[in-house]
Each structure stands twice: as C-alpha cells, then as structure tokens.
Amino acid sequence: MKSRDEALALDAADPLAPLREQFSIPPGLIYLDGNSLGVMPRAAPARAQQVVAQEWGTGLIGSWNSAGWMELAPRIGDKIARLIGAGPGECVATDSTSVNLFKVLNAALAIARADAPAGTRTRIVSERSNFPTDLYIAEATAAERGLELVLADSPEEIRALLDERCAVLMLTHVNYSTGRIHDMAALTRAAHEAGALTLWDLAHSAGAVPLQLSDCGADFAIGCGYKYLNGGPGAPAFVWVAPRHAERFWQPLAGWMGHAAPFEFTPGYRPAPGIRRYLCGTPPVLSLAVLECGVDSVLAAEPLGGMAALRAKSLALTRAFADLVESRCAGHGLTRVSPRDDAQRGSQVCFAHPTHGYAMVQALIARGVVGDFRAPQILRFGFTPLYLRYADVWDAVEHMRQMLQGEEWRQTRFNQRAAVT
Ligand SMILES: *Cc1c(COP(=O)(O)O)cnc(C)c1O
C-alpha cells in the first residue's frame, strides 16, 4: 500500500466491506483495540432492551422456559464451535476465561494423571510469556495438587519439556503481547507423542484466525467473548472439550447447572452428559444475549468466505500497517515485534519502544487512534477485519507519523498512568 488512494481502491474492492455496517463505531475513531474489547454490534442495544423490558420485565420467571434462557449457553456454544473448527454439542458459553481455565486444567490433569506411574505426569508446561491470568490459575492449581508449573521461553524449550513428566501442555495459541501464533497441530502431536494432553487458550484466536480444534486433535480449549467475538465488556467466555474426554471427569466447579437434572433437587451430584457438565451456576442471561449478537456479527462473514476470508483481510491489514510504520515512522526508536511471516502472526501488530511506549499510545488515542500499551514496552494494535478499512490503516499510520514528528508524547498528560492501560 503506497498511498491513501490505493487504500481507498482496496476498500472499494473489498467483498467484506459491508460487514462494517453491523457495528456502531464512533465517527472519526480508528479503533485498533478490538483484540481487547470488540466494538458494539448495532443489534446489541435492542436485544438488551428486549431481554430487560420484555423477557425479564413482563415474562419474569416464566422466561426461563418461554424465552429459552436455559438454551443460551449451549446455543451460543454451538455458534462459537463453527468458528473454532469444532462440532455441535462440544462447546458452551459460560463464566470467564479464567474460571473456564480452572475447570479444564483440572479436568485435563485428572485425565492425564489417572493411570500415570508414580513420579510421572507431575508437570503443567506453559510459557513465561503467557497471559498472566493463565499462569496464576496454573500456579494455584499446581500448588493445590502438589504439582509443578514449568515455564518455557521458546517453542524449542516447550518441545524439550514434553516428556513423561508433562501432564498438560497449556498454551495460548496467539500470544497476547507479541501476536505470535503457535503451531497448534504440531505441538498437539508432540504433546500426545509424549503422553501429555493439550489445553489451548483461544482468547486472541477465536474470531481472528481460522482454527481446526477437532482436526488438530486438541484436547481442551477456552476462549474469550469480549475480544474478537464482540460480546461486550466482561462477556461470558467459552469452553470446549474434545468429545472423547467430555464425560471422563467431573470438573471441579460442579454446580447445579452442570447437573444432569438440576430441577430434581437431589442431594448428590450427577454430571450432565457431554459439555453441559462444564456449566456451573445460573447463567448471566443479559450478558449471554448480548454476546450472541457479537458472535452473530462474526458468523455474518460465513456467506462471504467465513474465517478464511477474514483471515486473508486481517493479514493484508496487519502487513500493510507494519510495513507503513516501518517506512513512514522510521527514526523514532520503534522496533517491530510481531512476526513478519504471515503464518506466524495473529491479527495484531506490536512495536516496542524502550521508554516512551505508554505516552505514545496515549498521544495516539488523543488523535482518535485507539491501540493499547502492554508493559513493559509494547505498543499493541489489533486489527479486526470485520470493521476495519484499508483507509483506516493508512490514516492511523499518518497520525502516528505526525504524533512522532511533533513529539506529542512528551506532554505531561500522556505520561500519567491510568489504571487500565
Ligand atoms: C484476555 C485474556 C484472558 C482474559 O481472562 P478473563 O478471565 O476474561 O479476565 C485470559 N487469557 C488470555 C490469554 C487473554 O488474552
């Protein structure tokens, strides 16, 4: 991409362009943070209003049956399954990513260790650069069970740790900070050859990159509802379990919604068949209803080529952005962190700056270009192909060039840390 005119021509020829109409995006804003909080689908306010005013306001308790509230979690799970290469009945939308991780990590450990000789399968293997909540949950789980959390610093180190000591390989598919993608099929195969199970966090993958959970032979997966799935702030997350494992274990949060017959009110736990046993308590109906609008906004790409088409556009956007920043913003101390190889890059681009990354991101936000900062030095820009245009890429880089040229980041107001970065 060499000019704004070229960007406009690419937009005019983009078969996915009409999908932007689904969203409410503040005028003038270039939103490069859909990997942290997706934008609002236009359908969401009316759906929330319907649930509040009619289903709750008028239908009251009868709406559990008449409005199908109990079916939301499995129905939305089935829709998400279409985006992650899984089948119907294998996924539910529920709880948070952190909570779902706790459930599946414990299930995976129980299965991996079930028949293990003493002294084997004592490790959870992950990466030091994994998202902190994943590491915290794993650390707590390991401590609780008298196991060990072992962290690798590279894909080579991960492979070296796959032996009879490894019970579960727990990885985030697309790294939240660098955007680097793990080879899910290859690592799953290597883990299985070592007798271990795999657990994939799809927080930065679902709705952003095509996934083939079933074909890869993956064992467990979790993912986020409020990032590329546009489900709204704090939206319920999802959990997927390979059908071969689903009924082998009671997950540790064995609440009544995961019971085979919750309304029999029996004192003993009898897990529901299949993935439903991964539910815990009463579903957040409002949040689920709005999440469904977000998931539908991604499924709307299906007739236009689906995830493959979204991925092709995402790569074109991230490639253009990274190349333009390198060529037009040179000389300001920014280093490209995200992989140059398309196959290894998720739907985001990151640059590092040794000292002023935070202030630079704030100065860009003041210009209407929203990215975010990830300590200690990452400027992170997420690209959601559902609603971003090539012209947005061009304009974002032009803002960045002017901001850096004018050293706008030096202003005091851009150097004061807010609670959420
Ligand atoms: C965003 C993200 C989460 C978020 O977890 P919550 O429970 O929703 O706070 C977890 N893991 C990864 C890898 C993430 O990127």
Image (cartoon, rainbow, N blue to C red):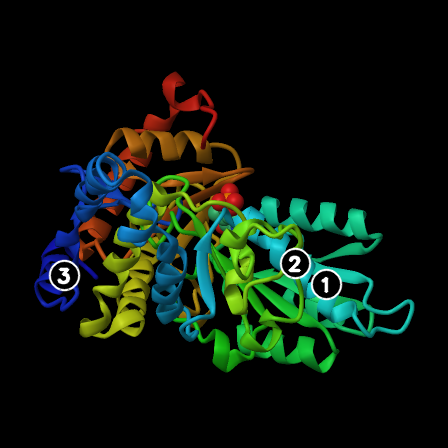
Q: Position of residue 203 (x, y in %)?
A: 47, 55
Classify the position of the C terminus by image quarter.
Answer: top left
Q: Residues within 10 Å of mark 1 (few under 14, many from 20)?
A: many
Q: Position of residue 295 (x, y in %)?
A: 30, 57
Q: Residues within 10 Å of mark 2 (few under 14, many from 20)?
A: many
Q: Is residue 396 left or right of residue 228?
A: left
Q: Secondary structure at mark 3?
A: helix
Residue 110, by quadrant, is bottom right
Q: Residue 5 has which mark?
A: none
The mark closer to the camera, 2 or 3, is 2
Q: CA distance from mark 2 to mark 3?
A: 39 Å
Q: Is residue 362 left or right of residue 90?
A: left
Question: Which of these two is toward me, 317 or 71?
Answer: 71
Residue 151, by quadrant, is bottom right
Which residue was labeled with disc 3? 17
Which residue was labeled with disc 1? 109
Whether residue 364 appears in this view of the structure is: yes
Disc with the residue nearer the chain's start (1 vs 3): 3
Q: Amino acid at mark 2?
A: Leu
Q: Is residue 375 left or right of residue 56?
A: right
Question: Which of these two is toward me, 395 or 262?
Answer: 262
Which residue was labeled with disc 2? 105
Q: Amino acid at mark 3?
A: Ala
Which residue is rendered at x = 40% and y = 73% of the image? 88
